[in-house]
């Protein structure tokens, strides 16, 4: 039995409003973000292992120098600012969990990336270099209430204009789906 969006919101699971776009000049976007008040938080080396699941997406995120996390999320594939409902689970033994999930579910895709993280108010700005895919920008606004949803859409639209993200650069797919399309 799957988890509906209504069940997720009623249980107060976490939610972001997100946008993903191709970005040919990460340095320029980072400079623009800092000029408008974003704070640089560091560079992360991440490996996301996606598993085959019936509903949503399930990945094991391993980040150098940080604890691993199991992340389940549900998000539509659209080139618009869209909600992503998610559940984060801290992981003590990533290699053992990966073995168990691979044995029971199978690995769907692996995404490796270098991520520059910036924060602008409640928005995470990700400037990503993804192995075999290229360079991208993600905007993720954390939302807790219905009012936050409306404000998040407005803030993401303003950021998109400030960072000069063109409509033609917006992407509907996750990195895992882009990786999978390379082998088709």
Image: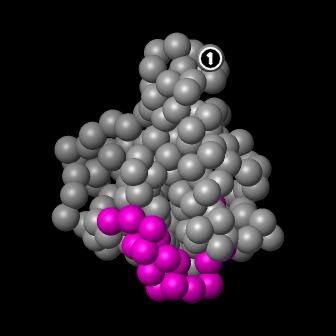
| Residue at screen point 57% across, 38% down | 151
Give the left or right position of residue 114, taking residue 97 as reference: right
At label 1, counting other C-alpha atoms closer than 10 Å, the crowd grade (few under 14, some 14-19, many 20 or more) is few
Which residue is more in the foreground, 26 or 184? Answer: 26
* Residue 121 position in % (x across, y down): 39, 51
* Residue 125 position in % (x across, y down): 46, 62
- Residue 105 in sight in this render: no
Which residue is more in the foreground, 94 or 47? Answer: 47
Residue 89 on the magenta span: no
Total count of labels: 1
Considering only vertical position in the picture, is 110 above or below 28?
above
| Residue at screen point 55% across, 27% down | 147
* Residue 65 position in % (x across, y down): 19, 64
Colouring of the image:
one colour
Picture quarter containing residue 180?
bottom right
| Residue at screen point 51% across, 85% down | 28
Give the left or right position of residue 122, taking residue 96 as reference: right
- Residue 150 in sight in this render: yes
Residue 33 on the magenta span: yes
Picture quarter containing residue 48?
bottom left
Task: Give the residue at mark 1.
Answer: 6
Q: Quadrant of the N terminus?
A: top right
Considering only vertical position in the picture, is 72 above or below 170?
above
* Residue 44 position in % (x across, y down): 32, 69
Label 1 sits on a secondary structure element that is helix
List the single residue furthest toward the front: 36
Give the left or right position of residue 41, taking residue 129 as reference: left
Q: Quadrant of the C terminus?
A: bottom right
Which residue is more in the foreground, 97 or 88? Answer: 88
Q: Which residues are magenta?
A: 18-39
Give the left or right position of residue 30, taking residue 67 as reference: right
């Amino acid at each position: 039995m799957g988890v509906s969006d209504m069940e997720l919101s009623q249980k107060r699971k976490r939610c972001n409003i997100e946008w993903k776009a191709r970005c040919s000049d990460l340095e320029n976007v980072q400079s623009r973000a800092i000029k408008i008040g974003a704070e640089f938080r560091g560079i992360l080396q991440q490996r996301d292992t996606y598993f085959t699941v019936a509903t949503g997406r399930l990945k094991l995120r391993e980040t150098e120098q940080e604890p691993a996390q199991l992340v389940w999320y549900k998000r539509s594939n659209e080139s618009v600012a869209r909600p992503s409902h998610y559940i984060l689970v801290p992981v003590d033994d990533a290699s053992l969990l990966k073995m168990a999930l691979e044995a029971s579910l199978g690995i769907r895709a692996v995404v490796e990336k270098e991520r520059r993280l910036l924060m602008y108010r409640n928005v995470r700005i990700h400037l990503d270099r993804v192995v075999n895919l290229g360079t991208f920008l993600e905007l993720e606004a954390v939302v807790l209430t219905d009012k936050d949803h409306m404000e998040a859409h407005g803030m993401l639209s303003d950021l998109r204009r400030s960072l000069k993200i063109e409509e033609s650069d917006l992407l509907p797919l996750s990195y895992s789906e882009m990786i999978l399309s390379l082998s088709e």
